[in-house]
């Protein structure tokens, strides 16, 4: 297990090529993908997402979406991390947890740790976060992480709220 970040309650590690079942299982719950609109139809698609989207970010940018495990039993509860979006030249904070782990502060804990890692270890200047305006829980996470509302934007024909946080101490 390649642990990247450790918090009081969580371990964030790099995904590996054998983690397709974790990605698939996480996305099976319609409530989990309610606002993301990106279902994964089968294990093969989960493998493709892992190999073509998640794993390359580690090599190219030294960050990405990381598997989140709950201590001490190391149960997989979802993912959180930073993702570079070349089309927009920005680093995006994202998170997705299994429904059983909502409302317990895990998303905020993981997101705050990822922002800190991005600023302190990777010297990233600006991190953005986006949420569907109806996804109030996700908006709360962004605000708790110290992100400031930037704008409502239409992205891929959907209205999205965009937040940002600036690294005032690095770069």
Image: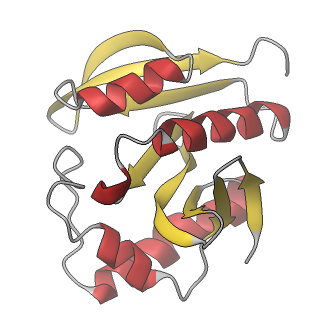
Q: Is residue 53 left or right of residue 133?
A: right
Decide: is 144 above or below 93.
above
Residue 62 seen in the current view? no
For image coordinates 47% across by 42% down, the residue present is 107
Residue at horizontal 33%, vertical 68%?
26
The answer to whether 116 appears left or right of 18 in the picture is right
Foreground residue among 154 and 65 = 65
Percent of width and height locating residue 32:
24, 55
Please state, as top left, top right, bottom left or bottom right, where the C terminus lies in the image: top right
Residue 21: image x %, image y %? 39, 84
Q: In this orientation, which residue lies closer to the viewer: 108 or 44? A: 108
Locate residue 170: give its quadrant: top right
- Residue at point 76%, 30% (across, down): 119
Specify the quadrant of the image occupied by residue 1: bottom right
Q: Is residue 68 visible?
A: yes
Q: Is residue 124 left or right of residue 42?
A: right
């Amino acid at each position: 297990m390649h642990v990247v970040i450790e918090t009081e309650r969580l371990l964030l590690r790099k995904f590996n090529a054998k983690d397709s079942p974790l990605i698939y299982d996480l996305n099976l719950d319609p409530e989990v993908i309610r606002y993301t609109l990106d279902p994964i139809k089968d294990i093969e698609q989960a493998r493709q997402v892992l190999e073509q989207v998640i794993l390359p970010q580690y090599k190219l940018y030294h960050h990405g979406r990381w598997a989140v495990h709950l201590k001490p039993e190391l149960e997989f509860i979802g993912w959180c991390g930073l993702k570079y979006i070349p089309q927009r030249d920005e680093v995006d904070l994202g998170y997705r947890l299994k429904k059983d782990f909502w409302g317990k502060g895990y998303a905020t804990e993981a997101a705050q740790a990822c922002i800190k890692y991005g600023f302190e270890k990777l010297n990233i200047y600006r991190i953005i976060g986006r949420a569907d305006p109806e996804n109030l829980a996700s908006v709360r996470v962004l605000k708790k992480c110290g992100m400031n509302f930037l704008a409502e934007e239409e992205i891929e024909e959907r209205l999205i709220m965009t937040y940002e946080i600036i690294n005032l101490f690095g770069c």
